Image (tube, rainbow, N blue to C red):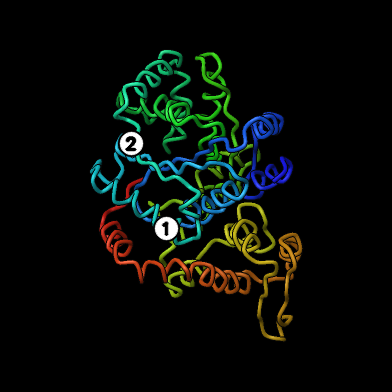
Amino acid sequence: MDTETKIELICKPPTEEVLTIKDLKNLLETEQHPIAYNGWEPSGLVHLGTGVICAYKMKDFAEAGIHFKAYLSTWHAWLNNKLGGNLQLIKKAADLFKYSWIALGVPKDKVEFIYSDELYDDINYWTKTITIAKNLTIARTRRTLEIAGRKETEAHYVSDFLYTPMQVADIFHMKVKICQLGMDQRKANVVARELGEKLGFWKPICVHHHLLQGLEKPTIWPIPKGKEKEALSSAKMSKSKPETCVFLYDSPEEIKQKITKAFCPEKTIKFNPILDICKHIIFRERKTLTIERPAKFGGTVEFQNYQELETTYRHGNLHPQDLKNAVAEELTKILEPVRTYFKNNRQAKECLNIVKNTETTR
């Protein structure tokens, strides 16, 4: 595969940002199978954002011949007191993440799944962590707390400040050349880029993907000018608010119910979670979207691409409920392989039941 085709796959939506394309091209021209990674705090059920969106990028990277490491960061979840700080439950959630991606078609022969325990027995990892910590001020570390889902004012324990040095150390200890994470992890990746060469490592490339919006109405609406980025970060899909997200294992009835109740203002494109799902999932999976409606309301209409759908919706020629009905139906079909996988795989089903019966934490 030539370099340009690899770059197209890596930059394929839902990718939103690459730091930098020039660095990426240089890397791909000098290394045949560089290492990329994404890391997750396993802390509950898997929703469309963590599951489907992340699976897309894992499959893109695998197709491009990149050695992809899916890092199940149980210790970061422990630091962040997820699942009550119960490390055994966190490990079960990590297993659930792995099963979920495999159910979505992530090739387990091309993606390497790694748990924290496999890294942290090595004293060299902690040497890297301390070296990075010695080169980070408290103020700079506090500004990166978004990566742990916290505001700058929410750091109350010493462990809160370990999070970023450990995450940056993960990158260099796993020999990662491409950090492929969500936009909410940008600040940690930028620290890695800034410190890498200074500490004798390298400057990793950052490939950040879109954060899928939650189904609820933003707390402040309409969004004030200049606050869009902040609003989107706080409105991202979150398993700690189960009524505002679609889980991979939801039944067709649950999907229908959640989508029907979702925020979807007429003629409004920005911060519309239903259109967000259309753009980043439906049209990634399908070449067209068919919306059935009675003849008196315009009859059945078929959209060939997302831009057609957006234009029609903006002009008020498509009712929110008609759009919701179609999206619920498409999501039900897209997630059918996941429901089948968990129905037929005993270990995966047992793992899902354990996590389902555990209280999810932010």
Rendered position, 356 above or below 89: below
Callout 2: few (<14), some (14-19), or many (20+) C-alpha neighbours within 10 Å?
few
Rendered position, 183 above or below 271: above
What is the three-letter code of the residue carrying label 2? Glu
Judging from the image, what secondary structure is the residue with disc 1 in? helix
Give left or right: position of 241 versus 91: right
Of residues 196 and 312, the one nearer the viewer is 196
Extreme residue toward the bottom, this view: 295
Of residues 356 and 102, the one nearer the viewer is 102
- Residue to which mark 1 is pinned: 100
Callout 1: few (<14), some (14-19), or many (20+) C-alpha neighbours within 10 Å?
many
Give left or right: position of 265 versus 2: left
Number of the front mark, 2 or 1: 2
Q: Residue at x 69, y 32 (%)?
A: 29
Sequence-wise first label, 2 or 1: 1
Residue 163 in percent (x, y) is at 38, 29
In contact (CB < 8 Å): disc 2 and disc 1? no
Judging from the image, what secondary structure is the residue with disc 2 in? helix
Residue 24 in percent (x, y) is at 66, 33
Query: Which mark identifies residue 118?
Result: 2
Residue 344 in percent (x, y) is at 36, 71
Residue 57 in percent (x, y) is at 57, 49
Q: Residue at x 66, y 35 (%)?
A: 28
Tell me the quarter of the picture where residue 231 sits.
top right
Rendered position, 340 above or below 97: below
What is the three-letter code of the residue carrying label 1? Ser
| Cα distance between the residues tagged 2 and 1 | 21 Å
Of residues 295 and 61, the one nearer the viewer is 61
**The C terminus - image quarter:** top left
